Image: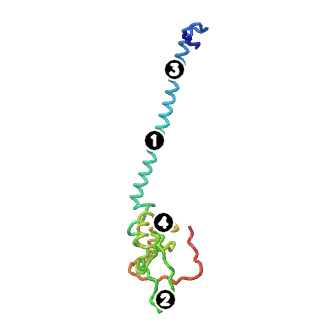
Amino acid sequence: MSMSSPSSWLLSDNSRYSTRARLLFMGLSFAIGILTFLLYLALWYLCSSRRRRRQQQRRAAIMAGAAADDANGGGEHGMSADAIAALPTFVFAPGNGDVEPPAPAPLDCPVCLGQVEAGEKVRRLPKCGHSFHAECVDAWLRAHSTCPMCRAAVGTAAAATATKQQAVENTVVTPAPAVATAEALPPV
């Protein structure tokens, strides 16, 4: 068995191209390959540095926004304890002591999904009129500045309109008896 000689025009001796031309072609092919790889590396570096710079700018903007919110007393993230305390609070009493009180409408707390029992503190938001357990809505308002039900802004302006008498925690308020008519819902 004899080994066959390579049939490539670059490596065969009986090619019509000279050795010098073959070496020049191989050198140019190698140089073009290296230049293509270097061009790819340069483009990759430019794109990754731009992306890294944009991410750093976003992080800096987020940090500056968080610092501004902290300087403004919480900004959009929640309400201060003073503003929450200024919201109207009452003690839930299902009946007013009459001989035969009407059946009160059950009051549910949408935050904890529990029913409000007699004697529990309830906080009513002044803008939308929604009522919640005081502890539940206080925790919500420390993190958010909107109503948990309708997302209406509660804000310090709404809390400032609440009168001192409404903010007294020991006031006993009896809810109105249930009516068979449908109530209009606040806008969402």
Q: Nearer the viewer, mark 3 or mark 1?
A: 3
Q: Which residue is depicted at the point 46% across and 86% down?
A: 95
Quadrant, the C terminus: bottom right
Of the residues tagged 2 and 3, which is closer to the observer? 2
Q: Secondary structure at mark 2?
A: loop
Quadrant in the picture for residue 140: bottom left
- The residue carrying mark 3 is 31
Q: Earlier in the sequence, mark 2 or mark 3?
A: 3
Mark 1, residue position:
53
Q: How far apart in space, not on screen, are marks 3 and 4 (Cα)?
A: 65 Å
Distance between mark 3 and mark 1 Cα atoms: 33 Å
CA gap, disc 2 to disc 3? 97 Å
User: In whole angstroms, how far apart are the C-alphas of marks 1 and 4?
Assistant: 35 Å
Q: Is mark 1 in CB contact (under 8 Å) with mark 4?
A: no
In the rendered structure, which disc, 3 or 1, sits on the residue that comes first in sequence? 3
Sequence-first tag of 4 and 2:
2
Q: Which numbered circle lies on residue 101?
A: 2
The percent position of residue 43, horizontal first and vertical second, equals 51, 32
Tell me the SS state at disc 4.
loop
Tag 3: amino acid: Ala
| Among the two numbered marks 3 and 4 on one chain, the one whose residue lies closer to the N terminus | 3
Which image quarter holds the N terminus?
top right
Q: Relative to 22, say whether 117 is above or below.
A: below
Find residue 100 and report its horizontal and vertical position in percent. 49, 91
Q: Which residue is mark 4?
A: 146
| Sequence-first disc among 2 and 1 | 1
